[in-house]
Image (cartoon, rainbow, N blue to C red):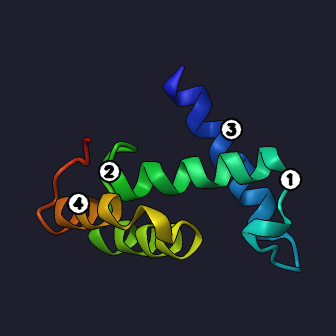
Amino acid sequence: MKKILFLMVAAALAIVGCSQKQKSISDMTPMEKEVYVDSLVNVASGIDGVTLRENRKNALEILRKEYPNLENRWKRMEECINNMELYSE
């Protein structure tokens, strides 16, 4: 099930990334936005497997820009990234 979900996310990101005109998150359909944000959370939290620290930080920065009202959560996630730990609430 996880592999299928991961492949779906990867395919969706590939489709979005291959378009010549980059969409902002606000221009995405609700389904595209959900898949994109879920993939960012998976990368930033480390639950998608072995991920480079820099990739996790980049995903976190995108999340911070899109959802600034969740700063307490992002601070805790950043601590986990710096310690190379999985994020859990």
Q: Position of residue 29 (x, y in %)?
A: 86, 53
- Of the 4 image quadrants, the one containing the N terminus is top right
Tag 1 residue: 29
User: Disc 1 or 4, which lies upstream in sequence?
Assistant: 1
What is the distance, in whole Å, between disc 4 and disc 3 at their CAs?
A: 28 Å
Q: Are marks 4 and 3 in contact (CB under 8 Å)?
A: no
Q: Residue at x 26, y 41 (%)?
A: 89
User: Disc 3 or 1, which lies upstream in sequence?
Assistant: 3
Tag 4 residue: 76
Q: Residue at x 39, y 70 (%)?
A: 55
What is the distance, in whole Å, between disc 3 and disc 1 at their CAs?
A: 16 Å
24 left or right, relative to 86: right
Q: Secondary structure at mark 4?
A: helix
Q: Which mark is on residue 46?
A: 2
What is the distance, in whole Å, between disc 3 and disc 2 at their CAs?
A: 18 Å
Q: Position of residue 47 (x, y in %)?
A: 35, 43
Above or below, comparing residue 87 to residue 26 in the picture: above
Q: Position of residue 79 (x, y in %)?
A: 17, 65
* Neighbours of disc 3 within 10 Å: few (<14), some (14-19), many (20+): few
User: Disc 4 or 2, which lies upstream in sequence?
Assistant: 2
Q: How many discs appear?
A: 4
* Neighbours of disc 1 within 10 Å: few (<14), some (14-19), many (20+): few
* Neighbours of disc 4 within 10 Å: few (<14), some (14-19), many (20+): some
Q: Nearer the viewer, mark 1 or mark 4?
A: 4
Q: Callout 1, which amino acid? A: Thr
Q: Secondary structure at mark 3?
A: helix
Q: Nearer the viewer, mark 2 or mark 1?
A: 1
Q: Nearer the viewer, mark 3 or mark 1?
A: 1
Tag 3 residue: 8
Q: Secondary structure at mark 1?
A: loop
